[in-house]
Image (cartoon, grey):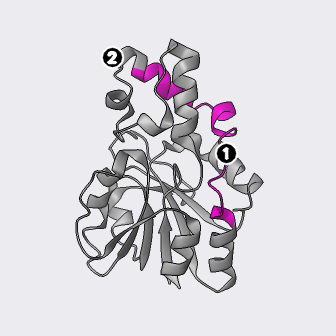
């Protein structure tokens, strides 16, 4: 099997850290449990200038490297690799974060798993060499049997795979979302994901 795994808020607790960063930068208190939108500008009610500052700071290496691992993630992904499955981490993080992201993965036990930065939102203006940067046309040539994803805005990137089983990592910003079809299943943790992939 080939398994797609999103990075932020599936492997690590990105939104929890952004909630702390929001307070550090602007003394604005929005607890993790109150983050009701994937779009953090909307969730945190920030103007463009403050949102850009939050995003810039949140993508600095020292911040990326402090994110906590989502419990059970490394254990489950390594089990899949040991069973011979191909696991790919597909992130919408900008390619400029690749080195810090790769270092975080290696430090947390994901060193055998390939990381791709997918230009999901058209933010990248340069073409990067090395095979770790994906444009949408390259991504759409890939096949996956399962996908683990927390963002409802990313669901559109699965439309070309009608047989794909999508395991939606339960987060505050997706709890009220209606899932697109029977092949989507909400999962509370990595233990449940492991059982469903079996």
Dividing the picture into quadrants, the one containing residue 173 is top left
Residue at left offset 35%, top offset 39%: 36
Residue at left offset 58%, top offset 45%: 13
Q: Which mark is residue 68?
A: 1
Residue to which mark 2 is pinned? 47
Query: Is residue 58 part of the magenta span, yes or no?
Result: yes
Instruction: Kindly indicate whether the residue at mark 1 contacts the one at mark 2 (C-beta within 8 angstroms).
Output: no
Please provide the residue range marked out in magenta.
51-74
The first of marks 2 and 1 along the sequence is 2
Which is more toward the observer, 191 or 86?
191
Q: Position of residue 51 (x, y in %)?
A: 40, 22
- Indicate whether 159 appears above or below 82: above
Residue at left offset 24%, top offset 68%: 159
Which is more toward the observer, 88 or 18?
18
Which is more toward the observer, 95 or 33?
33
Real-space Cα separation, disc 2 to disc 1, in angstroms: 28 Å
Q: Position of residue 191 (x, y in %)?
A: 58, 70
Q: Residues within 10 Å of mark 1 (few under 14, many from 20)?
A: some
Query: Is residue 149 part of the magenta span, yes or no?
Result: no
Q: Residues within 10 Å of mark 2 (few under 14, many from 20)?
A: few
- Indicate whether 21 appears above or below 84: above
């Amino acid at each position: 099997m080939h398994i797609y795994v999103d990075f932020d808020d599936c492997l690590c607790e990105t939104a929890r850290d952004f909630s702390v960063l929001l307070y550090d930068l602007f003394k604005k208190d929005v607890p993790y449990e109150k983050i009701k939108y994937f779009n953090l500008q909307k969730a945190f009610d920030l103007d463009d200038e403050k949102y850009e500052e939050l995003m810039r700071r949140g993508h600095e290496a020292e911040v990326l490297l402090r994110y906590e691992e989502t419990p059970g993630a490394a254990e489950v992904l390594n089990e899949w690799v040991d069973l011979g499955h191909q696991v790919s981490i597909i992130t919408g993080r900008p390619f400029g974060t690749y080195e810090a992201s790769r270092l975080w993965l290696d430090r947390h036990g994901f060193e055998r798993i390939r990381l791709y930065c997918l230009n999901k939102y058209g933010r990248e203006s340069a073409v990067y060499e090395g095979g770790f940067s994906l444009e949408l046309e390259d991504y759409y040539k890939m096949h996956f049997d399962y996908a683990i994803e927390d963002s409802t805005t990313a669901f559109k990137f699965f439309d070309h795979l009608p047989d794909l089983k999508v395991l939606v990592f339960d987060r505050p910003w997706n709890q009220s979302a209606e899932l697109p079809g029977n092949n989507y299943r909400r999962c509370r943790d990595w233990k449940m994901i492991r059982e469903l992939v079996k």
